[in-house]
Amino acid sequence: MRVLLVGVGGVGEAIAALAKPREWMKLMVLADYNVKRAEEVQKKLGDAERFPVEAIDASNQEAIEALAKKYNVDLIMNAVDPVFNKQIFDAAYNVSANYMDMAMTLSEPHPTDPFNKVGVKLGDYQFEKAKEWEKKGLLALVGFGVEPGMADVFARYAADHLFDEIEEIGVRDGGDLYVEGYKFAPTFSIWTTIEECLNPPIIYEEGKGWFTTAPFSEPEMFEFPEGIGKVEVVNVEHEEVLLVPRWIKGVKRVTFKYGLGDEFTEVLRTLHKLNLDNKDKIKVKGVEVAPRDVVAACLPDPAHLGDKMHGKTCAGTWVKGTKDGKKKEVYLYQVADNQECMSKWNCQAVVAQTAFTPLIAMELIEKGIWEGSGVLGPEAFDSIPFMERMAEYGFPYGMRESA
């Protein structure tokens, strides 16, 4: 496979590191706005021929198309903030390359009732173009990170193999990670985190469809495995709620809850109060800049925090329903330990855990195990081949079951 990797931040680096030992990966172009960053990753990989470096502006669709043509790529992997999704998605279509992302095109809150009604939903732009992709015989894989991505594969597996009827599928994400030496240091893109956490969270219910609620709503204590323990989780906007009901029929409720912590939640609320979460540019002393970009620039780069991070992060899918007439609950999960991730790949746990799903998906597409055309989420494919490969890639899954 020949891949154009757009974005060589923390997750992009982890994707490249995981790709290096895979013989089926013939070429992966490391394309980033920050060429020095891409060169830094290339040097770590030690293989300039298979991992060439290119400068790219992810907002420039023509430039993306030109690079894709230059290297004759099979797939464009979108590893930048989702604000750039439309142009990367459309570029792939124009050059007849397959496409993959880890977060779908952005939502827009309902103009008059944002905490009850949906406006433009995550991925609407992409799903509206699904028939065009089908006609062209191209495949756009959307939501192929860890959450969304692995969590959706778990939902498919539970529906096919563990339950007869499903009452609720709820993604639950939490951990005990902390960053030494910083008062506040997000372990993932703050741009994306602000988008997810301050937008109205979306919920799905059978008969009602998709609807929204207030940020940080419905707090609950969830017990995470492998020593992490109980963490308070709250509703957050996320793609799984949009993806699961499209392919898993009969599910009565779908939610996504994330363990943010009181301090992180308060920081996000303060940014919102001060309008520093605004992603639209404003003029400051003759210079146009988006407040959210300023916030991101002021914080440490998550890609360089690995040696200061400690603890574990857990991503998983909790499913409640019945099997053979008996009630049951299952939590399918993956726990990534930061020390192990740094030792194996020199990448911190959050970005490494996010990166393995697109690599497995690429392998399954390359080997013809997963096939299709159009705009498809992880639930559209057989879960078994993916889950069989998780341990081989260094991210084994676990399952906790209770009656």
Image (cartoon, rainbow, N blue to C red):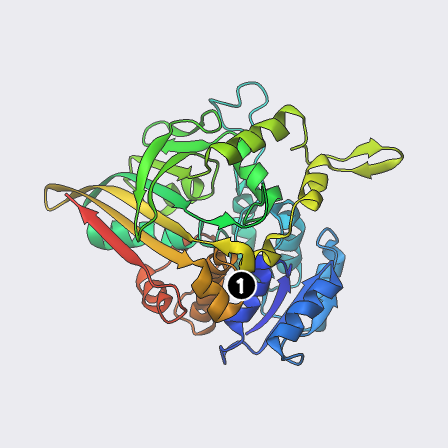
> Residue at the location (32% across, 67% down)?
388
> Residue at the location (52% across, 36% down)?
264
Q: Quadrant of the N terminus?
A: bottom right
Is 294 or 24 nearer to us in this picture?
294
Is 271 or 311 nearer to us in this picture?
311
Q: Quadrant of the C terminus?
A: top left
State the count of labels: 1
Which percent across, then down, holds residue 150? 40, 55
Which percent across, then down, holds residue 11? 56, 58
Q: Is residue 5 above or below residue 210?
A: below
Which percent across, then down, holds residue 280? 72, 34
- 92 relative to 114 in the view: left or right: right
Q: Residue 164: in sight, yes or no?
A: yes
> Residue at the location (51% across, 29% down)?
200
Residue position marked by numbered label 1 in the rendering: 347
Q: Is residue 241 above or below residue 377?
A: above
Is 128 or 56 nearer to us in this picture?
56
Is 233 or 49 nearer to us in this picture?
233
Which percent across, then down, holds residue 319? 27, 43
- Please tell me how crowded label 1 is: few (under 14), some (14-19), or many (20+) other residues with Cα within 10 Å: many
Tell me the kind of residue under disc 1. Cys
- 323 relative to 106 in the view: left or right: left
Q: Which residue of the protein is positioned furthest toward the top in this rendering?
A: 112
Q: Which residue of the protein is positioned furthest toward the right in this rendering?
A: 286
Dividing the picture into quadrants, the one containing residue 245 is top left
Q: Residue 379: in sight, yes or no?
A: no
> Residue at the location (64% across, 44% down)?
83
Q: Is residue 114 above or below residue 55?
A: above
